Amino acid sequence: MTGEPTTHDTENTAVPADAAEDTGGTGAAGGDRASDGGRPHPGDRLRPGTAVTPLRAGLHLRGRRGSLTLEGSTAVPVVWGLLEEPLRTGGLAGFRDGLEPGSAVRAATDTLLDRLADHDLLLPAPPAAPHPHPDPAVARWIDATAAHPDAAAALLATARAEVLASDPNSPTATAAVRALTAGGVPVTLTPDPDLPPDRILLTVRGTGPDRAVAAGRGGATGYVTAPGSTAQARADAAALEARLTHTAVEPQPRRIPGTFAALLAGAAAHRLLCAAARLPDPATEADDPRLLPGIPTVLLADARPARADHHSWLGPERIDTDRHVHLAPPTGLAEALRRITALGEHRCGPLPAPLPGDLPQLPVPLATCTPPAPAAGHATTPRTLTGGGPRLDLARLELFCRAAELLLGETAFTVGADPGHARGRALRHTAARRLATAPHDRPPPDPAHWSGHPQLRHWWTTLTGRLAVPARLEVHRAAPHAHAYRAVVRRTPHEPGPGYGPGPLLGEAVEATPGDAAAFAALAAVTTVTTVRTAAAATPGGAPPPPSGGAAAPLAAAGVPTAAWEDPGWTGGWLADLAGREEALQDTLHRLYGAGPTTTPPAPERDSGLAGLLRSFGFTVLHTPEEAR
């Protein structure tokens, strides 16, 4: 049997039919065993709660801390039938003593025990002294959950809990007392008139630092904060209640239903007990791919329909040390979108989630979001943002960055998923602005060299053919001998000629080749026209946003293999080509417009506000001097 250790995942492990012969005299499975280093020894027992499903030629075992599939030999279920009772009852030592050393059965048994230990499904034998926690139900829970049950039980045995509530007789407070008492911890119920009526605060004191958890509701949604200091729990609860009340779509019921109060109180008590015993937080047990490692989680619950799940969340007041997290930049587009989803959670997220909604996805993928009203000094009413891209995921990323910039102060910051993405967006914005006012006294590049670009042909045909928009495309080199070009698409005036303007701008782009620039400008024009025609924009007919073009291409292409037949006519092949040219383009634009946006110094440890929150989630925020934009 072979396989790597895993936790909370099913590991498919092959069992050779001749395992007994192969392990007869060699390897860790044979002979005497060490009792340390996590290896199984004669006193090991199966973790309580482990479920076993026999297979035709193997077994599947599921425990609280891991799972394992053993396949490859019809002897495995037979060996397990002999081994299961001794493992569950603590009689493994006597069972192994009855097996002949060096025999095939002894070798197969030891190999199976090795795999169970690798996947954290075994516990050491109970110590000679009584269990640190006398309650059998609590002892079984600790044994099923803890990596070191004796240490966890000792911590819990010294813990003392307190429940604070404005009304000690409220359903939530009394349910919390019951749950903590069932966990084997002495509880004190204390009135606290400073707490809102629907909020409770649970604290625990013991040999470690004091920990606290708050539970309550905002609107019709209940919450349970992540464990932290008392000050942190109070701050998180206040911020969550304000946010949930603001985003509520249903009026708040006058009283919390009894079952809903029990759910919130039980979840809060569970998180507090795990923190007191230094057990894994319940949020980590489900392997939810939406949760971001390193970011604290809150539990959000709804009564109708009944639902409760965890969400990555950082409050505006980050008091505790573990709240000053700074994730590494995302390594790919999928990871960036996971973080955008967390920041844009519709109930507790501080930013809007760019989604397609009911917008048409042809001829160009569109996404939309409505940021909340920015801080004083900027626009006072929310405005709907709509954007498009070669793919919906790229449109969502671009729209999220624009929404964040709007909330930060549209003329002062540039946001990106990682430093390269933010730098590429900022340099393109600066180059487009500078080139828009520069005289074009040089002849444009020969269209024969770039008009055959397959992406340009597609988007230009869409604009002028399918959408029937009369338009004009111009491409200019940024500087002599520079590998940087600006392309603009303008609507052709109804009465062209002397005395008439060039027509409204529909799209522009700055890229490393004239074909790429023309393609992105045509794509931006299609987005502008489609947005106006679907009435998706808050200000139809407004100027298109600054160009971002291929700034996200390295993220989109990272770790994504490109087939040999994917030429630039395919979006994946085009993005891979753009990614290969991005670094050189940024160097060129920085050389030409070095006075433009530059990366800000590293964020301070206590970086508050929206910029600090974005940096905590691994996004890059560049300060852009207003005069440079």
Image (cartoon, grey):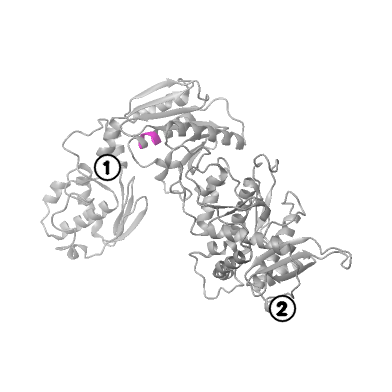
The main secondary structure of the magenta stretch is helix
Residue type beneath disc 2:
Asp
Residue 214: x and y in percent read: 46, 31
| Along the viewing direction, whichever of 94 and 600 lies nearer the viewer | 600
Q: Where's the C terminus, which quadrant?
A: bottom right
- Which disc number belongs to residue 148? 1
Q: Which residue appears farthest toward the front when viewing the image?
A: 595
Residue that badge 2 annotates = 446
Read off the magenta span: 270-274
Q: Is 72 displayed left or right of 486 in the figure? A: left
Q: Where's the N terminus, which quadrant?
A: bottom left
Tell me the element at label 1: loop
Residue 587 in which image quadrant: bottom right
Q: Which residue appears farthest toward the bottom when viewing the image?
A: 448
Residue 358 visible in the displayed image: no
| Along the viewing direction, whichever of 272 and 137 lies nearer the viewer | 272
Residue 211: x and y in percent read: 39, 33
Magenta-colored stretch includes residue 272? yes
Residue 30 in which image quadrant: bottom left
Residue 39: x and y in percent read: 22, 52
